[in-house]
Image (cartoon, grey):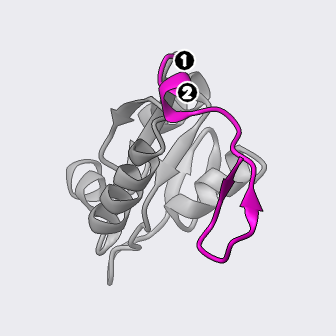
């Protein structure tokens, strides 16, 4: 048991050393657009500071993907999400003045976020 700065007792459960011996958590990471790379990078550093190990699998998603494929999100993204099961993503842009619609798996979506909500029941 230890004390916080107000003098109240705080229980400690385990230590960073104990947690760091566990297998890393595999997480699919999308930096996204705009401030996405900055906030996702900062959040990643916070998570790493906990001592929990992560195996970050990074993929482009968002405007960069749109410029390459004409869609913000692709079937390749969905397959990666189904395989890895855990995603950590930043904000996505709907390209201004462009056709925002994406067709995947026989359905039409208005944004990358809608694809995630509808395909994974979020």
x, y percent for residue 63: 29, 63
- Would residue 74 be seen by someone viewing this image from the given angle? no
* Numbered label attached to residue 12: none
For disc 1, the neighbor class at 10 Å (few under 14, some 14 to 19, many from 20) is few
- Whether tag 1 and tag 2 are in contact, CB under 8 A, the answer is yes
For disc 2, the neighbor class at 10 Å (few under 14, some 14 to 19, many from 20) is some
x, y percent for residue 66: 29, 57
Q: Does residue 16 show up magenta in the picture?
A: yes
83 and 69: which is toward the camera: 83
Q: Is the stretch drawn in magenta largely helix, strand or loop?
A: loop
x, y percent for residue 28: 45, 36
Cα gap from disc 1 to disc 2, whole angstroms: 6 Å
Q: Which residue is mark 1?
A: 22
Q: Which residue is mark 2?
A: 19
Give the tally of numbered discs.
2
The outermost residue toward the bottom is 97
Relative height, residue 103 to residue 36 (above, below)? above
x, y percent for residue 2: 66, 52
Q: Residue at x 28, y 48 (%)?
A: 69
Q: Quadrant of residue 55?
A: top left
92 and 49: which is toward the camera: 49
10 and 81: which is toward the camera: 10
Relative to 118, 66 lies left or right: left
Q: Residue at x 41, y 55 (%)?
A: 46
Q: Residue at x 34, y 52 (%)?
A: 45
31 and 80: which is toward the camera: 31
Indicate the quadrant containing the C terminus: top left, top right, bottom left or bottom right.
bottom right
Helix, strand or loop status at disc 1: loop
Helix, strand or loop status at disc 2: helix
Q: Does residue 58 show up magenta in the picture?
A: no
- Would residue 26 be seen by someone viewing this image from the given angle? yes
Stretch in magenta = 1-21
């Amino acid at each position: 048991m230890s004390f916080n700065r107000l003098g109240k007792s705080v229980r400690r459960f385990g230590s960073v050393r104990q947690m760091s011996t566990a297998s890393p958590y595999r997480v699919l990471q999308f930096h996204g657009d705009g401030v996405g790379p900055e906030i996702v990078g900062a959040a990643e550093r916070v998570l790493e500071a906990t001592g929990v190990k992560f195996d970050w699998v990074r993929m482009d998603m968002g405007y960069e993907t749109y410029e390459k494929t004409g869609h913000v999100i692709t079937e390749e993204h969905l397959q990666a999400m189904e395989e890895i099961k855990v995603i950590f993503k930043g904000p996505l842009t709907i390209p201004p003045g462009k056709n925002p619609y994406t067709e995947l798996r026989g359905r039409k979506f208005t944004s990358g976020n809608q694809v995630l909500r509808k395909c994974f029941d979020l």
